[in-house]
C-alpha cells in the first residue's frame, strides 16, 4: 500500500516523458457501481425545471349539472346558449375541454437530497473506475491507442489558447479517436425532444481535468464531445455519464498531483472537511491467487465432482431382477441353489396310535 | 539435461491431487473389506432366519398333532401383526375415523401399513373398520411388499430401499443391517418393531387386479371388502401389489 504504482506523464507532443508520478489514493477507492447508480439517479434530477398545467385550465366555465330527469348524464354542463359549447360537459377529466386528472403542480419535489458522504463516495468510485481500461472500453471510449491509463498530460496543455493547437495535442496523445467517435455519432434524436430544442444527440468524448485554466477551457469549448472540469469540483454526472462507470479522463499533471490533496491519501489530509476515502472490504483483489495460496490449500478439503454421481435413477424390482435381489439379499443365491423354497416335508412313518396306549393304561 | 519448467501452481496442484488420489484408493480398499464382512454377516443372518421360520412353522404343526394325539387341544396364539389397507377415499369421512386413519398413516386410498395388534390398536382399527380392509399377512406377503414397494422415511423423504446401506444408515443402531433383518423384525414383531415400522413409508398399492367385490363398502363377511378378512388379506395384497 505504501509503494504506489507509478504513472508516466505524456508530453503535449505525445512522447512519454521521464517524469513519473505516484498513483493517487483515490484510484484504489472501492469501485461500487451500485452506489454510483443510486447517487447518479438522484443527482441527475437536480437540474430539472418545473412543469405544470395552468392552474385554471379546464375551470374557465360556469358549468352546472342539470341533475336527474333530463335523460342525460349528470356531469356538469356549460350553461347559456347560442353556441356549440352550451350544454357540453365540462370540468371532468373525461370531458372534452375539461381539467385533467390531478393537474400537475409546480411544487412537486423536483430535487433530491443526497447524503454528502454518499455523493463523495460515488465520485471517488467513479474516478477509481476511470483508471480501469476494461471499464473505459466497456463504456465505449476508443482508448486502444492511448499509451497508459490514467492518461496524464504535461502542464503546457493548460495554457493552450487556440482550438487548433488543443486538437493537435489530443491527436498526439491518442485521445482524438474518441473525438472522432463523437463527431460520427451525431444523429437526430428519436422522439419529441426533436421539437423541444434537443434536436441532435451524440456520444460523450474525453473529459479533460485541469488544475489551472490558462485558456484550455476556451480552446476545447468548440471541440465536439470534449468536456473540461476543474479538479476541485469533479461531478458524478461527468465522471459516470448514464451511471456507467469508466469515463475517459485526460488529466493534466497539475490536476493529477493535486488529486491527493483533494481526496486525501495515507500521507495527506483531504481539503474536503471531515473526509477520508472509503475503505475497501477486500484489500487483495487477486482472489484466484488467494485461493491457490499455500495457506488456503493446506486447510481446504479435496474438491468434489463438478456434477454429482447419479447413483440411483430407477428403482428395479428385486422380485424380477436377479442382480438387484442379490445386492439386497446375498443369501438368495444359496436359497435358490438348495431349492429351499420347494423342500418337501419328510413324512414321518410313525402312525398315530389308535388308542392302543390308553387301552393298556385302562387295563 | 534441460528440464521443462512447470508453473509452481501446477506443481503444487499435482502434488495435492496425488495425495488425495492415494487417500481415496486406501479408503476404497478399507470400504471394500468392510462391505465384504457385512455381506457375510447378512448372509449368515438370512440363513438363520430361514431356519427360524421353518422351525416355527413345523413346531406349531407338531404341537397341534401332539395335542390331537393326547386328546387335548392346541389354541393358536392370538395374531400379533396385521396389515391394514385403506379402501375408502378421502371424501365424507366423519372426524373420529378420519383422525384414526391419520394416526395409522393411511392418508391415501389403497395405502397399506403394518400394525402391531394390541388392545389399543385393535380399538383403533375397530373405529376405522368401515374404511379399511385388514388381515394377518404371511411371510410371503411381507417379503413381496417390502421388496417391490418398500420405501424408507429418511430425513422426511421417501427413499426407495435400493441398497442395504440405506437401511443400515437409519436402523443400524437397532442392529438391523439388511432387508432380510427388516422383514424378520416385521414378521416376528420384534423389540424394535415400532421403529422399523415407522421407518417404512406407507405402502402405496395399486387397485386390485381382478377388482374388488361388487359392493366394496359392506363387511367382508357380508360380501363386501371392509373389515377383518384374516388370511384372505394375502390374496388381496397379491392382487394389489
Image: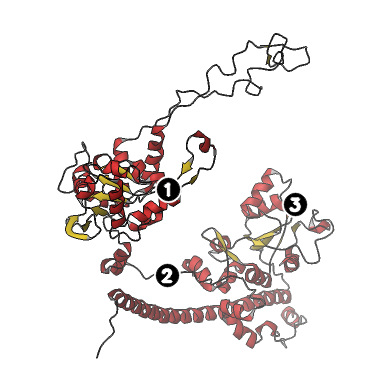
* Residue B15 locus on image (x, y percent): 31, 78
Of tags 2 and 1, which is closer to the observer?
1
- Between A125 and B25, the one lying in front of the other is A125
- Between B38 and A297, the one lying in front of the other is A297
- Between A272 and A253, the one lying in front of the other is A253
Coloring basis for residues: secondary structure
Q: Which residue lies under the disc numbered 3? A: B130
Q: Chain of mark 3?
A: B
Asked if residue A159 is positioned above or below residue A342 in the image, the reply reads above
Element class at badge 1:
loop
* Label 2 CA crowd tier, 10 Å (few <14, some 14–19, many 20+): few
Of callouts 2 and 1, the N-terminal one: 1
Q: Which residue lies under the disc numbered 2? A: A304
* Label 1 CA crowd tier, 10 Å (few <14, some 14–19, many 20+): some
Asked if residue B12 is positioned above or below residue A37 in the image, the reply reads below
Structural distance between the alpha carbons of marks 3 and 2: 54 Å
> Mark 3 near mark 2, Cβ–Cβ under 8 Å?
no
Q: Which residue lies under the disc numbered 1? A: A203
> Mark 3 near mark 1, Cβ–Cβ under 8 Å?
no
- Between A292 and B182, the one lying in front of the other is A292
Element class at badge 3:
helix
What is the residue that sits farthest to the left in this orientation? Answer: A267
Q: Chain of mark 1?
A: A
Residue A348 visible, this orientation: yes
Amino acid at each position: 500500500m505504501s509503494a504506489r504504482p507509478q504513472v508516466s506523464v505524456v508530453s503535449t507532443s505525445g512522447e512519454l516523458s521521464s517524469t513519473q508520478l505516484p498513483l493517487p489514493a483515490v484510484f484504489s477507492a472501492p469501485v461500487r457501481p451500485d452506489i454510483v447508480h443510486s447517487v447518479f439517479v438522484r443527482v441527475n434530477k437536480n437540474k430539472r425545471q418545473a412543469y405544470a398545467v395552468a392552474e385554471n385550465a379546464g375551470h374557465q366555465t360556469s358549468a352546472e349539472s342539470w341533475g336527474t330527469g333530463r335523460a342525460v348524464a349528470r356531469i356538469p354542463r356549460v350553461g347559456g346558449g347560442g353556441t356549440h359549447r352550451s350544454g357540453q360537459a365540462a370540468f371532468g377529466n373525461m370531458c372534452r375541454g375539461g381539467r385533467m386528472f390531478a393537474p400537475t403542480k409546480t411544487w412537486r419535489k423536483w430535487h433530491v437530497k443526497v447524503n454528502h458522504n454518499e455523493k463523495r463516495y460515488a465520485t471517488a468510485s467513479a474516478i477509481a473506475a476511470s483508471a480501469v481500461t476494461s471499464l473505459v472500453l466497456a463504456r465505449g471510449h476508443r482508448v486502444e491507442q492511448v499509451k497508459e491509463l490514467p492518461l496524464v498530460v504535461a502542464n503546457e496543455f493548460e495554457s493552450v489558447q487556440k482550438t487548433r493547437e488543443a486538437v493537435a495535442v489530443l491527436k498526439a496523445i491518442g485521445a482524438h479517436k474518441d473525438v472522432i467517435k463523437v463527431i460520427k455519432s451525431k444523429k437526430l434524436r428519436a422522439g419529441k425532444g426533436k421539437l423541444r430544442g434537443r434536436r441532435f444527440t451524440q456520444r460523450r468524448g474525453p473529459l479533460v481535468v485541469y488544475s489551472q485554466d490558462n485558456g484550455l477551457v476556451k480552446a476545447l469549448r468548440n471541440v465536439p464531445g470534449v468536456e473540461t472540469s476543474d479538479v476541485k469540483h469533479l461531478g458524478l454526472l461527468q465522471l459516470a455519464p448514464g451511471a456507467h462507470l469508466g469515463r475517459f479522463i485526460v488529466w493534466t499533471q497539475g490536476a493529477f498531483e493535486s488529486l491527493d490533496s483533494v481526496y486525501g491519501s495515507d500521507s495527506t489530509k483531504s481539503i474536503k472537511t471531515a473526509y477520508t476515502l472509503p475503505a475497501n472490504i477486500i484489500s487483495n483483489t487477486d482472489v484466484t491467487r488467494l485461493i491457490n495460496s499455500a495457506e488456503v490449500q493446506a486447510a481446504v478439503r479435496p474438491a468434489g465432482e463438478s456434477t454429482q454421481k447419479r447413483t440411483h435413477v430407477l428403482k428395479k424390482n428385486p422380485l424380477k431382477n436377479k442382480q438387484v435381489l442379490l445386492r439386497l439379499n446375498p443369501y438368495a443365491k444359496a436359497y435358490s441353489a438348495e431349492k429351499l423354497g420347494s423342500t418337501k416335508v419328510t413324512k414321518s412313518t410313525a402312525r398315530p396310535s389308535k388308542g392302543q396306549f390308553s387301552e393298556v393304561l385302562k387295563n | 539435461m534441460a528440464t521443462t519448467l512447470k508453473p509452481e501452481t501446477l506443481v503444487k496442484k499435482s502434488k495435492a491431487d496425488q495425495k488425495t488420489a492415494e487417500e481415496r484408493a486406501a479408503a476404497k480398499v478399507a470400504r471394500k473389506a468392510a462391505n465384504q464382512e457385512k455381506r457375510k454377516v447378512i448372509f449368515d443372518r438370512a440363513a438363520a432366519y430361514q431356519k427360524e421360520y421353518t422351525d416355527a412353522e413345523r413346531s406349531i404343526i407338531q404341537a397341534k398333532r401332539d395335542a390331537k394325539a393326547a386328546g387335548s387341544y392346541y389354541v393358536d396364539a392370538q395374531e400379533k401383526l396385521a396389515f391394514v389397507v385403506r379402501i375408502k377415499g378421502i371424501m365424507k369421512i366423519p372426524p373420529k375415523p378420519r383422525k384414526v386413519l391419520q394416526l395409522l398413516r393411511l392418508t391415501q386410498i389403497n395405502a397399506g401399513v403394518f400394525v402391531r395388534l394390541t388392545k389399543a390398536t385393535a380399538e383403533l382399527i375397530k373405529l376405522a373398520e368401515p374404511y379399511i380392509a385388514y388381515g394377518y399377512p404371511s411371510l410371503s406377503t411381507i417379503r413381496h411388499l417390502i421388496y417391490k414397494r418398500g420405501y424408507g422415511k429418511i430425513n422426511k423423504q421417501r427413499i426407495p430401499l435400493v441398497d442395504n446401506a440405506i437401511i443400515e444408515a437409519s436402523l443400524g443402531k437397532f442392529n438391523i443391517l439388511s432387508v432380510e433383518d427388516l422383514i424378520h423384525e416385521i414378521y416376528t414383531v420384534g423389540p424394535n418393531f415400532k421403529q422399523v415400522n415407522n421407518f417404512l413409508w406407507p405402502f402405496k398399492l395399486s387397485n386390485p387386479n381382478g377388482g374388488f367385490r361388487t359392493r366394496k363398502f359392506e363387511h367382508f363377511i357380508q360380501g363386501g371388502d371392509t373389515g377383518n378378512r384374516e388370511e384372505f388379506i394375502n390374496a388381496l395384497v397379491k392382487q394389489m401389489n
